[in-house]
């Protein structure tokens, strides 16, 4: 089952909220990602990006949080896993060997 990008984005936002991560969608000169603001976990997405890009960024940001206790549809679990792999591949291409090892260890923990 393939979800429309808007529906996918809404489901991902629900997952984020269920683990206590606020999703903020706003305009700005940024693409988005996860951050910690005054000890609160947040994921910020650029409002100007198309829904499929926002969904991918949100899924990639969620890969940094444990989702073990969350009940996910198989299609959603597959989407999250695919985006985690895309993020890992893109990150490895941009990092030194030592930094790649650290990123791999962090991603393996989640």
Image (cartoon, grey):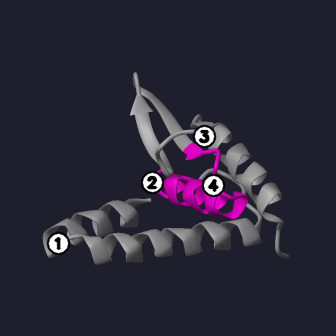
Q: Earlier in the sequence, mark 3 or mark 1?
A: 3
Left or right of residue 106: residue 76? right
Q: Earlier in the sequence, mark 4 or mark 3?
A: 3
For label 3, the crowd category at 10 Å Cα-Cα, with few meaning under 14, some 14 to 19 and many 20 or more, is some
Circle 1 residues within 10 Å: few <14, some 14–19, many ≥20: few
**For marks 1 and 4 on the same chain, the one whose residue lies earlier in the sequence:** 4
**Residue drawn where x is 69% and y is 46% of the image:** 13
Tell me the tag on residue 19. Answer: 3
The crowding category of the residue bearing disc 4, from other C-alpha atoms within 10 Å (few below 14, some 14 to 19, many at least 20), is some
Q: Using the image, tell me which numbered label, if any, was put on residue 49.
A: 4
**Callout 1: SS:** loop
Residue 75 in the image: state x and y as whole percent: 75, 72
**Figure quadrant of residue 58:** bottom right
Q: Which residue is mark 1?
A: 96
Mark 1 and mark 4: Cα distance apart in space? 29 Å
Disc 4 element: loop
CA distance for labels 2 and 1:
20 Å
Identify the image quadrant of residue 59: bottom right
Residue 83 percent across, percent down from the top left: 55, 69
Q: Which residues are magenta?
A: 45-68
The residue depicted at 62 percent of the width and 62 percent of the height is 53
Mark 2 = which residue? 64
Q: Is residue 16 above or below residue 58?
A: above
Packing grade of label 2 (10 A; few <14, some 14-19, many >=20) is some
- How many numbered marks have been drawn onto this rendered protein structure? 4
User: In the rendered structure, does residue 64 fall within the stretch colored magenta?
Assistant: yes
Q: Is residue 86 magenta?
A: no
Q: Quadrant of the N terminus?
A: bottom right
């Amino acid at each position: 089952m393939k979800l429309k990008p808007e529906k996918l984005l809404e489901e991902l936002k629900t997952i984020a909220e269920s683990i206590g991560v606020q999703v903020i969608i706003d305009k700005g000169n940024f693409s988005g990602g996860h951050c910690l603001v005054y000890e609160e976990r947040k994921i910020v997405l650029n409002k100007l990006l198309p829904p499929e890009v926002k969904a991918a960024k949100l899924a990639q940001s969620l890969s940094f949080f444990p989702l073990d206790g969350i009940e996910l549809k198989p299609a959603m679990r597959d989407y999250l896993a695919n985006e985690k792999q895309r993020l890992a591949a893109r990150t490895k291409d941009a990092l030194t060997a030592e930094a790649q090892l650290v990123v791999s260890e962090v991603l393996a923990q989640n």
